[in-house]
Amino acid sequence: MEAQRHPNDFDGIVAGAPANQYIGLVSSFAANMRANTKSKTGYISPADARKIGAVITRVCAGTGGVKDGLINDPRQCRIDMASLPLTPAQLETYKALHDGPKTGAGHAIYAGLPFGSEAVGWESFITGPGLAKVRTNASQSLFANGVFSNFVYQEPGWDFLSFNPDKSPADAEKAVGGFLNATDPKLTAFRAHGGKIISYQGWADALVTPLGTLDYYNKVVAAQGRTKPTGRQDVSAMKKTQAFYRLFMVPGMSHCFGGPGPNEFGQGGGSGDADHDVVTALEQWVEKDVAPKKIIATKYVDDDLAKGVQMTRPLCVYPQAAKYKGTGNTNDASNFVCTGPSSTR
């Protein structure tokens, strides 16, 4: 929002799990909660989510050629839905959560939840501790009810069961979209000011879905290039974007922190080392024009600094991803390289 509306306020911005497409996001919260609670038989509990997560991890995990229990890119998962430990009613719920909310005509309202997030954050964000407490204990419920009841409808009794996919998102857009959304992909004034953005996003985030973050980033890339008559982007669009805006996707990380993957890289207070500290990396980019090519993330035992390092792994400039070199300790970031499609310099 700062980069779009007040582009001269900051020379550099670190944006973690940006909720900038807010109306679509909060509409997805309402739709998700409605889907998971509209019937007792279709409700997915925390235990169910953990069982789903175990199956998906077994099928899809393996970052950069290493079987480490982490999913490098959930979009590449190929899941036989019938193999999941769910009843037919629960499977219908799960498909709705994974596919994302749609209008009655089948048009997407917002992106769905990623494979691999089930056992990481669903209890906090979606299922709650149980059906009886989901309305007060699940974060998506609290956000959805708060925004629609207070800001959109001014009806204290409104809750997500009243969500209408053909009407509610449009009502929210009309009421508060101009205040809460920050969806301009051009970022023209911020770029002209010389501003730099480093964004990061957990691949296992079940609150701000990484698929929504990628949707916005791809729109930024498209806005930097010229669209050919065929619809293909100018090949320089990614390079132009990465000159001022770099995205780092984090395998196994939940919402900004936590999760089974390496999830500490200075976002909560770092070491001052640009290789391991995202804020210092931004400072180097803004003040010395040294753009970050990778940032080393650390997983501490039980996420406790005092217990020591469990593993390190490089975070790569999207669309690159970390790949094991084939030799050396797989818990050591130095034995991985960033590879794949890239325009970084």
Image: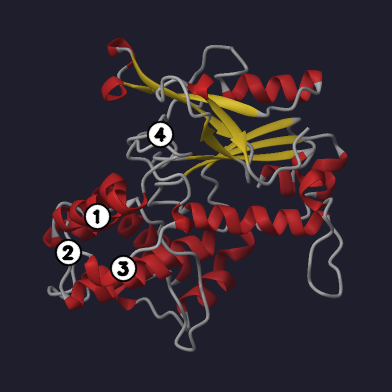
Q: CA distance from mark 4 to mark 3?
A: 29 Å
Horizontal arrangement in the rendering, residue 297 relative to residue 292 (left or right): left
Q: Nearer the viewer, residue 211 or 343?
A: 343
Local packing at callout 4 (Cα closer than 10 Å; few below 14, some 14-19, many 20+) is: many
At which x and y percent is residue 271?
52, 12
Mark 3 and mark 1 residues within 8 Å of each other at the beta carbon: no
> What type is the residue that disc 2 sits on?
Pro
Horizontal arrangement in the rendering, residue 285 relative to residue 269 (left or right): right
Q: CA distance from mark 1 to mark 4?
A: 23 Å
SS at circle 2? loop
Residue under circle 3?
80
First in sequence, mark 4 or 3: give its number: 3
Q: Nearer the viewer, residue 154 or 89?
A: 89
SS at circle 3? loop
Q: Which mark is residue 72?
A: none
Q: CA distance from mark 4 to mark 2?
A: 28 Å
Q: Residue furthest front?
A: 327
First in sequence, mark 1 or 4: give its number: 1
SS at circle 1? helix
Mark 2 and mark 1 residues within 8 Å of each other at the beta carbon: yes
Q: Residue furthest bottom?
A: 105
> What type is the residue that disc 4 sits on?
Phe
Q: CA distance from mark 2 to mark 1?
A: 8 Å
